[in-house]
Amino acid sequence: MNEVKNILLAGRLKEEVAEWLEGKRMGFEFRLREYKEVTVGDIGWADVYIAFYPPKGVSLAGVKWVHALGAGVDFFIFRQDWPKETLLTRTKGDFGNRIGEYCVARALAVTQNLVELWEAQWRHEWYRKEAGLLRGSQVAIVGTGEVGRGIAAKFKALGCPVEGISISGKAVKPFDRVFGRDEIAEPLKKAEWIVLAVPLTEESYMMFNESLLENCRGAYLINIARGEVVDEDALVEALDSGRLWGAALDVFVEEPLPAESPLWEMPNVLISPHIAAITSAEEAGESFLACLAELQKGQRPKLAVDSEKGY
Ligand code: GLV
């Protein structure tokens, strides 16, 4: 890649990332836009486009390099035609730790009856419900990448056996065992906690459908991946029928979750607004500069996305 000078930043975090990069005094020029404001002229001007999502209504074809601010790159590569000649890099942040804490916080909130106790407190009620024990309960994590491993480490630290599921089924630490995608029924059947930590790809799109959920025996589902990994109608049905005991959901097919979604009203569901791991400006800036340094040495950045695999 030749010189990278003109940086087009769009959407959330644009000011913060621009300020962080400006502080490095590397001679960058910036244009900051909302997604719907990006013009063909901006695309022509930019050496690199940095954002969580593609612009609205303008194609990215012609930009040499796109740096995604999120860990997941499906908005660029899965939900639209991706110009194959464009380099796509992603941000590496402390996502494994953040999402790991999000997951164990939900699991402990549930075993410790946190919400019920808090509600009873408001009624001034002496509500002596015994807590369950998280320690020793079986966890299955779908996705054994950086995020999946981070989640596994937190559950392991609390004394839970943890199995993983990945496309290859290759053993990876700290999972006790990793199953291939075609063997998923086995870990799902014995799991008390199922965590979804896969990138959204053709392979994972609507993966948790009615027939896969049939394998669940009253597990609690945590989804921090993407809403589209789960068929939401089948999820509601599994929660109603008890195949799933409950769910903590950070991501949805449509975000914000529409007011009429039955998920809002379900007492066994904990909803959060896509906040399990939020990229910081520093993580974004450092990842971008690491990629730039590799490009300037003529190397392919380690954070480059494999457009065939989709992550
Ligand atoms: C958030 O969902 C991300 O992909 O970073």
Image (spheres, rainbow, N blue to C red):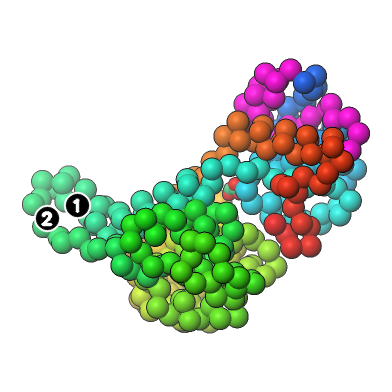
Marks 2/1 in contact by CB < 8 Å: the verdict is: yes
Q: What element carries label 2?
A: loop
| Magenta-colored stretch includes residue 311 | no
Three-letter residue code for mark 1 = Leu
Q: Quadrant of the C terminus?
A: bottom right
Q: Quadrant of the N terminus?
A: top right
Is residue 53 visible in the rendered image? The answer is no
Q: Mark 2 points at which residue?
A: 127
Q: In this view, does 201 lie above or below 157?
A: below
- Residue 113 x, y percent position in the rendering: 24, 57
Q: Is residue 77 above or below residue 191?
A: above
Q: Mark 1 points at which residue?
A: 117
Three-letter residue code for mark 2 = Tyr
Q: Say which residue appears at 84% left-offset and 35% top-offset.
A: 296
- Residue 292 x, y percent position in the rendering: 78, 35
- Residue 275 x, y percent position in the rendering: 49, 45
